[in-house]
């Protein structure tokens, strides 16, 4: 699988940040181990343990970044992003174990076994160098973690952020013990153990926050507010009647989102597909996500009777047109044309028309009478019986007749592109008629129907006339 340049850049930056973290952790561990040997300070020991944990965590982070950025495969169709969440969870456990050891050692020194430490200016200076390394690394990791939504790098950045505060506390503890030795204040020797307890407290607090987030990610908990935001944004998309359900889960820096929405039941497959595309794009603008949309057909609250009739026909797999209705004294009369396979028998065609009539009556519109005109659904492509040239005289006559009709119908401007052909012993006529552009489509339909009837009355040999209406500015 070929990775895009942007993805390759992201992987490279994340790996570089993880390697920098490993190098910094190794350097800090060396410095603090040296200080532990020189001073026997619990505060510095806790920092050394913390840095040792950071080194282990940095190695885990580097490995998790390498694995999590691998593309999905047959065994891992959702990718490897969860590896980052899992590695962050392991780091949380290591943090807690380290904090527990520090607390144990601090209480042991405070109440059971006094340890003489040997602080110095050199120890404080080395700790200040370690502090500057912690600050630099924490900022670098945090920038990369936010840029690429990497939970593993974020966990590593949090480790070094705690190092900053804990190092400050240890410097303060070592300084107080050093001051106690210089000015003969023995009680200040407890500052070192108290500093160790403070470091353990910081580790436990940060570890609990990190652990809660990584546990939520491993258990597919939805981030607070994100689900409601997606419901609102999807619900505002035109064509969505209602958002039935939104489910999401996170794997690494990507989300997997399942959305169920209600759409108008009369929408066709292409319209629903275009709507799901819009939903996917809108969600991708909010979070990096793979989105699956499921559409449920529903009747809108304000659905028109004609749309309800068409929905019944769609449910039965039938094609209808020319739906009309009239109502008087609480009685509804519905008429429509039903298209059926031209090879059906009258018995089968009537059975389907009866099913449609029953479905329309079940719409709950009161007393309903339904009259259905049955006609063949055109599938046969016919071949003209005669050549086009033999119909030329009739074309000219029809065109002349229609262009004389504006005196009767002032809506009509002119007629052109008249075509006459004889197909299977039937003469068929088609033409274009220019009409005033501000007419309603209902009026246009009435005029074209009248014109078609006039042509068939004037030329009885013509079986069918089809008129295409267009405004004057049509190309």
Image (spheres, rainbow, N blue to C red):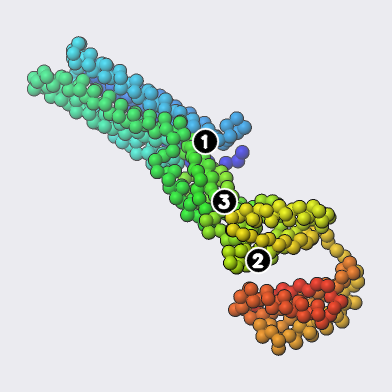
Please say whether residue 23 is visible from this viewpoint: no
The image quadrant where one finds the N terminus is top right
Mark before the other along the chain sequence, 1 or 2: 1
**Which residue in the structure is indicated by mark 3?**
298
- List x then y, in percent, for residue 431: 76, 76
Q: Nearer the viewer, mark 1 or mark 3?
A: 3
- The disc at residue 324 is 2
Element marked by disc 1: loop
Task: Tell me how far mark 1 sits from mark 2, CA to CA.
Answer: 60 Å
SS at circle 2: strand
The mark nearer the N terminus, 1 or 3, is 1
Name which quarter of the figure residue 208 lies in. Answer: top left
Name the quadrant of the C terminus.
Answer: bottom right
Q: Mark 1 and 2 residues: CB-CB less than 8 Å, in contact? A: no
Q: Is residue 44 visible?
A: yes
Residue bearing the label numbered 1: 69
Name the residue nearer the viewer: 100 or 263.
263
CB atoms of marks 2 and 3 within 8 Å: no
User: Residue shown at 80%/72% (left/top)?
Assistant: 464
Q: Residues within 10 Å of mark 2 (few under 14, many from 20)?
A: few
Mark 3 element type: strand
Q: Is residue 321 above or below residue 450?
A: above
> What residue lies at 32% left-to-right and 24% top-to-bottom?
50
Q: Position of residue 169 (x, y in %)?
A: 22, 29
């Amino acid at each position: 699988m070929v990775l895009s340049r942007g993805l390759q850049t992201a992987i490279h930056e994340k790996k570089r940040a993880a390697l920098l973290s490993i190098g910094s952790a190794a350097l800090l561990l060396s410095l603090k181990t040296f200080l532990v040997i020189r001073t026997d300070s619990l505060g510095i020991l806790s920092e050394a343990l913390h840095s040792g944990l950071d080194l282990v965590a940095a190695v885990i982070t580097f490995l998790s970044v390498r694995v999590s950025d691998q593309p999905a495969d047959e065994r891992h169709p959702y990718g490897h992003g969860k590896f980052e969440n899992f590695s962050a969870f392991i780091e949380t456990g290591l943090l807690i174990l380290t904090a527990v050891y520090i607390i144990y050692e601090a209480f042991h020194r405070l109440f059971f076994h006094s340890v003489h430490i040997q602080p110095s200016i050199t120890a404080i200076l080395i700790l200040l160098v370690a502090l500057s390394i912690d600050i630099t690394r924490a900022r670098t990791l945090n920038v990369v973690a936010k840029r690429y939504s990497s939970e593993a790098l974020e966990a590593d950045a949090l480790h070094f952020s705690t190092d900053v505060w804990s190092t400050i506390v240890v410097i303060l503890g070592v300084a107080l013990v050093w001051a106690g030795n210089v000015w003969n204040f023995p009680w200040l020797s407890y500052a070192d153990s108290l500093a160790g307890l403070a470091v353990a407290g910081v580790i436990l607090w940060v570890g609990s926050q990190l652990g809660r987030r990584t546990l939520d990610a491993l258990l597919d908990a939805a981030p607070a507010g994100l689900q409601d935001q997606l419901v609102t944004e999807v619900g505002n998309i035109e064509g969505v009647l209602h958002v039935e359900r939104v489910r999401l889960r996170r794997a690494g820096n990507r989300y997997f989102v399942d959305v169920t929405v209600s759409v108008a039941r009369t929408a066709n497959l292409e319209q629903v597909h275009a709507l799901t595309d819009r939903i996917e794009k809108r969600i991708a603008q909010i979070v990096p996500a793979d989105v699956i949309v499921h559409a449920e057909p529903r009747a809108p609250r304000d659905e028109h009777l004609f749309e309800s009739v068409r929905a019944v026909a769609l449910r039965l797999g039938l094609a209808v047109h020319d739906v009309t209705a009239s109502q008087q004294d609480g009685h509804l009369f519905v008429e429509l044309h039903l298209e059926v396979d031209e090879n059906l028998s009258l018995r089968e065609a009537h059975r389907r028309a009866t099913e449609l009539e029953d479905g329309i009556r079940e719409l709950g519109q009161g007393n309903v009478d339904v009259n259905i005109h049955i006609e063949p659904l055109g599938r046969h492509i016919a071949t003209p019986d005669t050549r086009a040239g033999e119909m030329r005289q009739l074309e000219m006559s029809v065109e002349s007749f229609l262009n004389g009709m504006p005196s009767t119908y002032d809506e009509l401007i002119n007629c052109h592109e008249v075509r006459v052909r004889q197909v299977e012993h039937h003469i068929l006529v088609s033409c274009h008629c220019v009409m005033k552009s501000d007419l309603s489509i209902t009026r246009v339909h009435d005029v074209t129907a009248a014109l078609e009837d006039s042509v068939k009355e004037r030329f009885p040999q013509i079986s069918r006339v089809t008129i295409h209406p267009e405004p004057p500015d049509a190309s």
